[in-house]
Amino acid sequence: MAYRPELIGGHLGLDLVNTVAWRLDAGRTVDRFAELANVERWLLAAGVSSGEPVTARLRDDLVTAREVAYDVLARLAVGGQATRAAIDALHGLIAGVVGSASVEVDPFGWRADDVAGAVRLAVWRLFEDEDLGRLRQCGDEGCGWLFLDRSKNGSRRWCSSGDCGNRARARRHYERARGGTTA
């Protein structure tokens, strides 16, 4: 079955880090960018495709941006602090793209010359524009996907209520039916 990107993070930078499925479960981890065709599907779904063929170099640039962003964001999502090394890597990622980006007047904003640069600018915008106090990690212990909790009361627990949320509800139901306790 062909990969269908799920853009549930609430921001392009988060959707980028979510291209690794089951990140916290080593036995199930899947890097969706392992295949160039999947990178192309993701770029199209995310609205940043240039229409040019996806190369291994572009994929590698996106994977680097993804992992640098994840190293910082994953810690923030669970109330921790990023390491100095992770922050320095993020600074390098952002400084490199901002230094080479142009400023457009109509509509006003930063523009990168290439797709990888556009995605790195999106990562920068995530840190600049979003309330990272609303950043969450999916409540499924193996998932690891990140999202912005835009719910009114800040109570979103799952990357997807229909996926990880349903699994958790089914697990609780099964435990109740067996007479076990719920976690």
Image: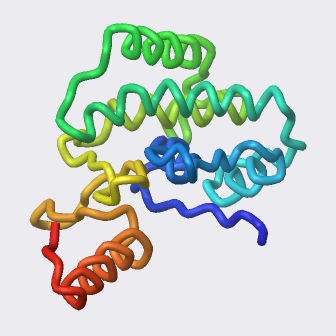
- Whether residue 104 appears in this view of the structure is no
The x, y position of residue 148, in whole percent, is 31, 52
Look at the picture and state if 6 lies above or below 120: below
Closer-to-camera residue (12/19)? 19
Residue at image x 84%, y 41%? 54
- How many numbered dots are placed on residues in this image? 0
Residue at image x 77%, y 67%? 2
- Whether residue 53 appears in this view of the structure is yes
The x, y position of residue 14, in whole percent, is 45, 45
The residue positioned farthest toward the bottom in the image shown: 177
The x, y position of residue 22, in whole percent, is 50, 52
Q: Is residue 64 left or right of residue 121?
A: right
* Residue 52 falls in image quadrant: top right
The x, y position of residue 59, in whole percent, is 75, 34
The residue positioned farthest toward the front in the image shown: 179
Split into 4 quadrants, where in the image is the N terminus?
bottom right
Look at the picture and state if 93 lies above or below 41: above
Closer-to-camera residue (129/161)? 161
